[in-house]
Image: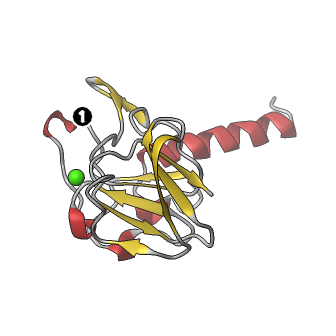
Amino acid sequence: MFSKTKLAKFGLSAAVAAGLVLTLSTSANAASVYDISHGEGSCPNGYVCLWPEANFIAHHFALESKYSAFGSNQNVGDMGKLGRGPAGDKGMQDVTSSVVNKTGSSICFYEHNWYGGAEFKIGPHEQWPYLPNWINDKISSFKYC
Ligand SMILES: [Ca+2]
């Protein structure tokens, strides 16, 4: 028999695991959402969302090496290792061209993993259908700031 504590832990783990594969409509409590659709409206409230194409357009990469869009409600230190695919680490590194911030905090995006290199800061609830050239296709991590 499981104790109540073990059951609670199992439930939490199952919820986290489910969040990795479920789509936006069913993962409201997950920290990350994958395969967000086109348009800023597909980004859940309370999340930061990134798209590989301008104007919030998702992009399906060859061999599914990268996610077509990504959102999170927490800091992400390494966008190259968001999950695992058939070819190894799968993420969305160095491709972001539009972002939406549906949080009440400013968000800082970075050129390198773990918040290094050039910093691009946006305010609460801002939408950027295009990124400045100096950070376009370079975002590798982001955090609340
Ligand atoms: Ca891009």
In the image, what residue occupies the spot 62% across and 73% down?
Answer: 104
In the image, what residue occupies the spot 53% across and 39% down?
Answer: 77
Indicate how the structure is coloured in the image: secondary structure
Please state which of residues 58 and 100 is positioned toward the viewer in this rendering.
100
Instruction: Give the quarter of the figure containing the N terminus.
Output: top right
Instruction: Give the quarter of the figure containing the C terminus.
Output: bottom right
Which SS class for mark 1? loop
In the image, what residue occupies the spot 27% across and 40% down?
Answer: 66
Across and down, in percent, residue 117 comes to: 46, 40
State the image quarter where residue 124 is shown: bottom right
Where 94 sits versus 125, above or below?
above
State the image quarter where residue 40 is shown: bottom left
**Amino acid at pointer 1:** Ser
Please state which of residues 1 and 125 is positioned toward the viewer in this rendering.
125
Please state which of residues 51 and 31 is positioned toward the viewer in this rendering.
51
Q: Is 129 left, or right, of 118 in this rendering? A: left
In the image, what residue occupies the spot 77% across and 42% down?
Answer: 8
Which residue is identified by label 1?
65
Across and down, in percent, residue 31 comes to: 57, 52
Across and down, in percent, residue 139 comes to: 37, 47
Where 6 sits versus 55, above or below?
above
Please state which of residues 120 and 27 is positioned toward the viewer in this rendering.
120
Where 94 sits versus 28, above or below?
above
State the image quarter where residue 33 is shown: bottom left
